[in-house]
Image (cartoon, rainbow, N blue to C red):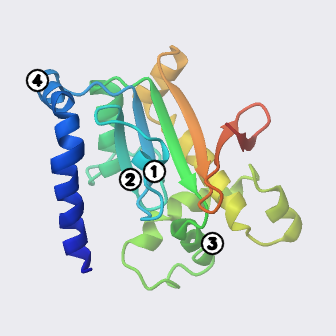
Amino acid sequence: MEATAKLKVGYLKFLQGYYLDHKDTFHDLVENGQHPKTLLISCADSRVEPSIILQNEPGEIFAIRNVGNLVPPHENDTHYHGVSSALEYAVKVLKVENIMIMGHAHCGAIQAAIDTENDPDKLGTEFVHHWVDIAHEVFKNPCCCADSIKSGKRIPREIEYASIVNSMNNLLTFDFVNERVENKELKIYGLHFDIESGQLRAYDRKSGEFGPL
């Protein structure tokens, strides 16, 4: 079946099934607006679908998806800031209580960061290699990278973990996030999804490692 035809069939199934069963929920979300408790920052990778993994309903999660589930540090400039503006809206307007960064195994963005560490032009891209500069910060920080340090080469799984932690730290460079965290009005979590096993692991600040939920 052609890809667009399959999407149309999927939409019709939604309209005639799920939508009808949850019509009141959608109407309520229009009448009363959205009040999600959680902001989820995840990867654009087609193999990792947060709403399926977490089984969330409409209105429960405010979502940001980008290449590599990366959070840039705060910057004072007039450039366009998609992630930062969505983050600001979630925290200052929607007043979410949780921020979850969910990375995953076999992440192409993390592999791109590894590949361009010493050769920024290796990918031949206009935008991607600049974006994954955010993940390059983890090469300066041994967090979650013990085996990479021992072997002297980048181990993707460890870099995926470290990049999640780096983005968690970058969240705190935004004053409006840091203030709410310090006031115990906001919590930050790091998650990693393994595609093969379906396992979701969480970052433990005390141990500095990712483990079972």
Q: Nearer the viewer, residue 150 or 20?
A: 20
Q: Are marks 2 and 1 in contact (CB under 8 Å)?
A: yes
Q: Earlier in the sequence, mark 2 or mark 1?
A: 1
Question: Horizontal and vertical percent for residue 191?
Answer: 59, 44
- Picture disc at residue 65: 2
Q: Is residue 51 above or below residue 117?
A: above
For label 1, the SS is strand
Q: Residue at x 76, y 40 (%)?
A: 208
> In which quadrant is the C terminus drawn?
top right
Q: Earlier in the sequence, mark 1 or mark 3?
A: 1
Query: Residue 159 sits in which quadrant?
Result: bottom right
Q: Residue at x 49, y 48 (%)?
A: 53
Disc 4/disc 3 C-alpha distance (Å)? 47 Å
- Picture disc at residue 31: 4
Disc 3/disc 2 C-alpha distance (Å)? 21 Å
Which residue is disc 3 drawn over? 114
